[in-house]
Amino acid sequence: MSEAVRSLGTYYLQTYGCQMNEYDSELISWMLEQMHYAPTDDPATADIAVFNTCCIRDNADQKVYGRLGEFKGFKRDNPNQVLAVSGCLAQKDGEEFLQRFSQVDVVVGTHNLTEVPDLVQRVQRGEGRFVRVERVGDSFSLLANPRNTHSAMVTISMGCDQWCTFCIVPYVRGKLKSRPLEQVVSEVKRVVREGRREVMLLGQNVNDYGRDLTPKKDFGDIIRALKGTPGLDRLRFMSPHPAYFTQSVIDALADNPATCGGIHLPVQSGDDEVLKRMRRKYTSAEFLDLVARMRAAIPDLSLSTDIIVGFPGETEEQFQNTLELVRQARFRNAFMFSYSPRPGTPGNLFTDQVPEEVKSDRLQRLIALQNEIAVEENRMLEGQTIEIMVEGRSKKDATRLTGRGRCGRLTHFQCEEDLTGRLARVRIQKAFVWGFQGELEACESRLGEWSLVPPAPSIPVVA
Ligand code: 5AD
Ligand code: SF4
């Protein structure tokens, strides 16, 4: 915000959940800054507090309810604070929020983000408390306020039409709504012009993109349209659905040099019967065949995934099939979850729910196996040099910088100079489950030229 414009106060914004929510938070923060509010890390004194929430699993709900309790105290000392709850849990619980939590003033669902400024002002004017969870409107017209100087998220679609039986997303985010191709391309070009060299294309199901547009488009069209965008070094996307990963999309990715090998491809289960009950539309053999075709086309492919254990009816044998798929697919990383029944989804109605202790035992066994594989895969890179996009100082050790390779792995290395937003070549010294510890070999100067490390001292020019 320009110094010339005095801020009217401060806002505190807390985000839960997925990248989609991170992106929505960037939109909310842009709107609040347009109202001349400045960000603060102090929830107690903020004039506006926003909770952008998630409801994908029950523990996500509980986290929000717990944290809201603290705001009751903040509000006693700061009675003019306006507390808004937005996002998926707001969409799911709606009116209930106002009844359960007297400290909450505004509830805005996933389709009504644009109403945040107006509703906040109405509360400030003493007009009451408000709930907006209608399935109208969209936020495609808003600008994001990226917190990152080198990387930006760009939404390509909202909602999802898959109705996987465990998932609450289609209920709270609505049907697939794709953004026009030209809008996506021009937003990517805008953020790249503003200096972001990495772009993450976002959608609940990115490769179902464009089915609802006239004329129809597909995800490959975006990847092809972005090929050769000057300044776009790294192109990422999340999350794709394996059943929609066509050969044409694979070819488009392989043909765009900005495509990063670190691709997230949620598998959910390795058992065909469970996949069917989850309504995932592929078998484990089809998934493994897709992985093989992707590896053939994208040589630096480094897959991560999501897996759910203990889906209703899952037997030990079916769980063993998931372990077998994990052994064969060799994911670099996996987000592993114990199934959490979500109200309103078919999975919640299945009568053969798996007991908690069985779910947690399976989860532990899956994590142990995947951790072994991650370390083995990471060790193969020891001694090699990889390109890192520097994200900033490590939170644990301020003498270290931290960043990610094109493969998506986290890498820490010692460096006094702050290289945030620049590319660096780092030699991998030691591999861990989470990524690497390495040694800086070369980095870009501020002007984008590469220099070896430590930079050669400049020699005075003698006349
Ligand atoms: N229980 C457990 N995990 C879930 N996920 C989605 N819904 C549930 C649920 N009900 C997981 C899936 C998805 C990720 C974002 O969260 O693995 O890919
Ligand atoms: Fe949920 Fe993803 Fe399935 Fe859509 S494709 S219903 S977001 S798990």
Image (cartoon, rainbow, N blue to C red):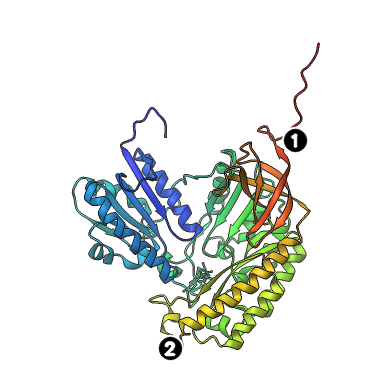
- Name the residue tied to disc 2: 351
Mark 2 and mark 1 lie on one chain; the one further toward the N terminus is 2
The crowding category of the residue bearing disc 2, from other C-alpha atoms within 10 Å (few below 14, some 14 to 19, many at least 20), is: few
Q: Nearer the viewer, residue 423 or 284?
A: 423
Q: Nearer the viewer, residue 395 or 451?
A: 395
Three-letter amino acid code at disc 2?
Thr
**Residue sticking out furthest to the right:** 463
Q: Residue at x 18, y 48 (%)?
A: 126
Q: Secondary structure at mark 1?
A: strand
| C-alpha gap between disc 2 and disc 1 | 63 Å
- Name the residue tied to disc 1: 451
Three-letter amino acid code at disc 1?
Ser
The crowding category of the residue bearing disc 1, from other C-alpha atoms within 10 Å (few below 14, some 14 to 19, many at least 20), is: some
Give the vertical position of 455 relative to 158 (above or below): above
> Viewed as shown, does residue 459 lie left or right of 64?
right
- Residue 268 position within the rendered picture, expressed as x and y whole percent measured from the top left: 57, 74
Which quarter of the picture shows residue 449? top right
Residue 374 visible in the displayed image: yes
Closer to the camera: disc 2 or disc 1?
Answer: 1
